[in-house]
Amino acid sequence: MTKEITKKRPGRPPGAKNRKTLLKQEMELLALETLHGMALDALNALHKNAQEGDTAAAKVLVDKFLPNAQPGGENDKSTPMVNINIAPATPTQPATINVTPAPTEEEHE
């Protein structure tokens, strides 16, 4: 008859996390979800204000989402990727923001 020797270790099993660590991870996850919701609310408010003719809100959106966009003129040799037209609100019409692909060289001819 062979006797099996089992060695019991006191304490947590290997890989188990401390309650403090688990609580910290839960708090971080909750904070991220809250910040994500607040960021979406702020983005929606900026979009709404831009649609109502707030050019500062439109500028913030364009600067954040198209940070490397350069204004082009008639003599500009670079090829734009998109055209952005912002028309402010008038008493009879709401503001409009149109983003369209720029025409390619083939379409110019």
Image (spheres, helix red, strand yellow):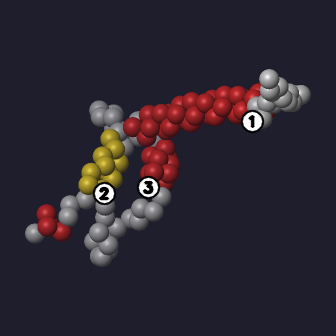
Classify mark 3: helix, strand or loop.
Answer: loop
- Crowding near the residue tagged with mark 1, few <14, some 14–19, many ≥20 C-alpha atoms within 10 Å: few
Task: Using residue 68 as the reference point, say whether residue 107 is left or right of it.
Answer: left
Decide: is 37 above or below 61: above
Q: Which residue is mark 2?
A: 82
Q: Position of residue 31 (x, y in %)?
A: 68, 31
Classify mark 2: helix, strand or loop.
Answer: strand
- How far apart are labels 1 and 2 at the CA level? 52 Å
Q: Nearer the viewer, mark 1 or mark 2?
A: 1
Q: Disc count in the image?
A: 3
Residue nearest the observer in this picture, 106 or 71: 106
Which image quarter holds the N terminus? top right
Classify mark 1: helix, strand or loop.
Answer: loop
- How far apart are labels 1 and 3 at the CA level? 44 Å
- How far apart are labels 2 and 3 at the CA level? 10 Å
Tell me which numbered mark, 2 or 3, is placed earlier along the sequence: 3
Amino acid at circle 2? Val
Q: Which residue is mark 1?
A: 15
Q: In the image, which disc is placed on residue 106?
A: none
Tell me which numbered mark, 1 or 3, is placed earlier along the sequence: 1
Amino acid at circle 3? Leu
Residue nearest the observer in this picture, 90 or 23: 23
Q: Which quadrant holds residue 73? A: bottom left
Q: Which residue is mark 3?
A: 66
Q: Given contact means CB atoms under 8 Å apart, are the residues at marks 2 and 3 in contact?
A: yes
Tell me which numbered mark, 1 or 2, is placed earlier along the sequence: 1
